């Protein structure tokens, strides 16, 4: 069992930055990949970024070059640094943990609003 708690969301102006955090607890030794997803009203949840247990990362085309995913194993935290934010980035951002067993866990989400 794994528990995920996101934080760091808020309201920011276009061009601004936010850093989201996802604190992980539980059976973290069997986590294969950590991912961030987002969902805006009326749209399906979409992939944003991922970091695997070997440190390799992947990004959605829409955020590549603006967002950076990273992890701090000592703090058991995964981050999503978001720069050059645009109104289209407005969404609820969710942290996701995928286990080596293929089980998947989700956090409760944190709201990001980009507006002038």
Image (tube, rainbow, N blue to C red):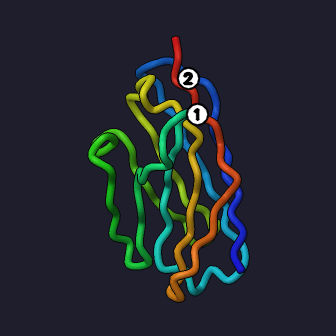
Find out whether the residues at labels 1 and 2 contact each other: C-beta distance under 8 Å. yes
Say the numbered circle drawn on residue 112.
1
Image coordinates for residue 86, horizontal then vertical, percent:
41, 25
- In this view, the residue in front, 43 or 22, is 43
Count of picture labels:
2
Horizontal relation, residue 81 to residue 84: left or right: right
Residue drawn at 45 percent across, 39 percent down: 82
Whether residue 34 is situated above or below residue 48 in the rendered picture:
below
Say the numbered circle drawn on residue 96.
none
Q: Residue furthest top?
A: 116
Q: CA distance from mark 1 to mark 2?
A: 8 Å
Residue drawn at 29 percent across, 45 percent down: 64
Image coordinates for residue 30, horizontal then vertical, percent:
57, 86
Residue drawn at 52 percent across, 74 percent down: 98
Horizontal relation, residue 4 to residue 84: left or right: right
Say the numbered circle drawn on residue 12.
2
Image coordinates for residue 23, horizontal then vertical, percent:
67, 61
Name the element at disc 1. strand
Whether residue 71 is situated above or below residue 113 in the rendered picture:
below
Q: Quadrant of the N terminus?
A: bottom right
Name the element at disc 2. strand
Query: Mark 1: few, some, or many residues within 10 Å (few <14, many ≥20)?
Result: many
Image coordinates for residue 75, horizontal then vertical, percent:
64, 66
Residue drawn at 38 percent across, 72 percent down: 55
């Amino acid at each position: 069992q794994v528990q995920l708690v996101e934080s760091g969301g808020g309201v920011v102006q276009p061009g601004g930055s936010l850093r989201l955090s996802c604190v992980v607890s539980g059976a973290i030794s069997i986590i294969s990949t950590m991912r961030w997803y987002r969902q805006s009203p009326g749209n399906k949840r979409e992939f944003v970024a991922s970091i695997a247990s070997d440190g390799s990362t992947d990004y959605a085309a829409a955020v590549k070059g603006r967002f950076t995913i990273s992890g701090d194993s000592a703090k058991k935290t995964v981050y999503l640094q978001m720069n050059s934010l645009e109104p289209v980035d407005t969404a609820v951002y969710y942290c996701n943990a995928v286990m080596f067993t293929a089980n998947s866990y989700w956090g409760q989400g944190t709201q990001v609003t980009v507006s002038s």
